[in-house]
Image (cartoon, grey):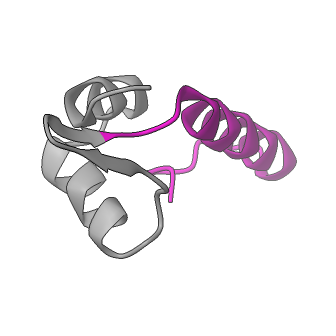
Amino acid sequence: MLTVEEVASELRVSQETVRRWVRNGQLPCFKLARGIRIPSEVIKDLIRINLQQENKKGRRIRGIL
């Protein structure tokens, strides 16, 4: 389980972007008393999908979602 800060760092986006994805339902999470936690498997899947799309198009895609 990752924090918003850890996810933002891993995906190279702002913490506010991660929070917006959570609010919009684009990023599954668990809301705990100590904050939001995102399963690490979800982030690994997003990175894998993004890399596959980059390979198909031959360029880097901005943002993950």
Residue 38 position by quadrant:
top left
Image point (46%, 57%), residue name: 27
Quarter holding residue 2: top left
Residue 13: give x, y in percent of width and height: 28, 41
Residue 35 locus on image (x, y percent)? 17, 40
| Membership of 38 in magenta stretch | yes
The answer to whether residue 43 is above or below residue 27 is above
Q: Can you say whether 2 is above or below 13 in the image?
A: above
Q: What stretch is highlighted in magenta?
A: 37-65
Q: Magenta stretch containing residue 44, yes or no?
A: yes
Q: On screen, 34 above or below 17?
A: above
Majority SS type along the magenta span: helix
- The answer to whether 60 appears left or right of 19 in the picture is right
Q: Which of 40 and 32 is in front in this view?
A: 32
**Place of residue 46 in the rendered image (x, y in percent of width and height, measured from the top left):** 62, 43
> How many marks do you count on the picture?
0
